[in-house]
Image (cartoon, grey):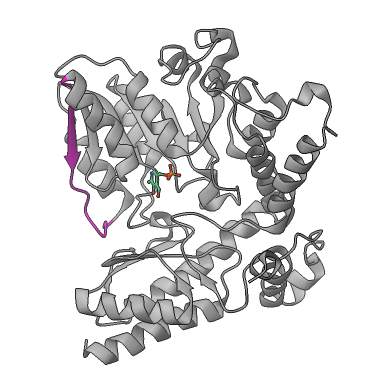
Amino acid sequence: MRRRDFFPALAVPAALPTDAIFQKDPERYWLQLRKEQFYLPETRAFMNNGSLGVVPRPVMQAVQGYMENAAALTIPEYEYPRWGYETLDAHRAEAAEYLGCRKEDLAFTHNATEALSTIAAGIDLKPGDEVLSTNQEHTSGRAGWLLKQARYGTTFREVAMPLPPPSPDALAEALLKEIGPKTKVLFFSGILSSSGIVMPIRKICDAARARGIVTVVDGAHVNGQIPIRIDEMGCDYYAGSPHKWMFAPAGCGILWGRPEMLERLWPSIVTGGWDSKDDHAARFMKVGTNNRAIFEGMIAGIRFGKAIGWPRVYERIHALARDMRTRAAALPYVKLLTPDQDALYGSLVAIELEKKLADAFMAECERRKIWIVRGLRIRIAAHVHTRPRDTEAFFDALAVSAKKVGA
Ligand SMILES: Cc1ncc(COP(=O)(O)O)c(C=O)c1O
């Protein structure tokens, strides 16, 4: 197979479908958007933004265009084609505007894992100090605290979350009631990884703050999936993975902190400038030579969302998820983890299946080229490229599998 056959040639992206099309026939708008702006073949149903998103054409072009210009040295010298020593002020300003924070408090990293590891390693804690968390954290969130526990004798305690939760308050209460005299840090995900449940971030952070407890929010699933500003969350530290929901290419992460919290955070990967506190968050971007093109892509992704209209994106993807949820709720062979309340989920719906059914379903999805996360707990993700027919295909594959195994 020639490379060109495998990977479609980069073409200048078409203009977005017009607003007139959206007003007249929204389904046509979204179909056209998928067809013209994404590389996804007709035959693929991609339902795993929860792991890593697929980039649209303008993002791919920004990455490739930047790399080509860098190779040809057609970029100005002051834009040396790397990051890892630079502060990328213009990029951070544009990202901060979308994310809802100050540029000075925002650093780019490679992913949420890196940001979370930096935060866990960089907070000063004494032996016996407790980090309180949920039992629903991603391994990338837990690992930094487990490492700290093993190395420094701090403790990491996980509290069971009610799943599905009866209300946002029930989630907050489950966590807050466990705060004890040794609790120094509260760490939790803004959107829980394997269930897609949206946590009441502000409520938890405000309550913790009132008790002098540092809050760290894992926002890997937040930005691009639900409309919330970082500076509205009330947390002290925040980590994100724009390559999941923000159309960014793989390898884009963010680290945010309140100014006074960043000031006292120790960096882990260092070069000259590690202690230059006048750089504020950019101190955490001094990590050595890196590929700057991915952040050109990240900014192109933010602009892509902005061109569609982020509110329109959120409304669409939540409506798709609501439809998935409604369908799942009607199936006797499915354990649904996503509650009915809109505030408790964004664009992820989670179901659990018996092993026999899950195995049959995975095989059926593979046969039909439906891309989903694998396992007994299945997290269905909708994004702007998701078609109603993808949802149909998903539930049809599930019904066929259930029949096959007699579920
Ligand atoms: C809640 C949560 N945190 C952190 C991560 C790690 O993200 P990344 O692999 O982008 O570092 C994930 C990945 O799925 C996640 O779901």
Q: Main secondary structure of the magenta part?
A: loop
Q: Quadrant of residue 387?
A: bottom right
Q: Is residue 165 rendered magenta in the image? A: yes
Q: Quadrant of residue 309?
A: bottom right
Q: Quadrant of the N terminus?
A: bottom right
Compared across the picture, whether 105 is left or right of 73 comes to: left
Q: Residue at x 30, y 54 (%)?
A: 167
Q: Which stretch is magenta?
A: 153-166
Q: Nearer the viewer, residue 272 or 32?
A: 272
Image coords of residue 316 (percent x, y): 58, 65
Quadrant of ligand 1 in image:
top left
Residue 31 seen anywhere in this rendered image of the structure = yes
- Looking at the image, the residue that sits furthest to the front is 1
Q: Residue at x 73, y 41 (%)?
A: 67
Image coords of residue 264 (percent x, y): 41, 12
Q: Nearer the viewer, residue 9 or 44?
A: 9
Image coords of residue 302 (percent x, y): 66, 46
Compared across the picture, whether 290 is left or right of 343 comes to: right
Compared across the picture, whether 23 is left or right of 74 comes to: left
Residue 227 seen anywhere in this rendered image of the structure = no
Q: Quadrant of the C terminus?
A: bottom left
**For residue 397, above or below residue 312:** below
**For residue 256, above or below residue 251:** above
Q: Quadrant of residue 81?
A: top right
Q: Residue at x 42, y 76 (%)?
A: 366
Q: Residue at x 31, y 30 (%)?
A: 207
Q: Nearer the viewer, residue 260 or 232?
A: 260
Q: Is residue 131 rendered magenta in the image? A: no
Image coords of residue 273 (percent x, y): 55, 10
**For residue 23, above or below residue 130:** below
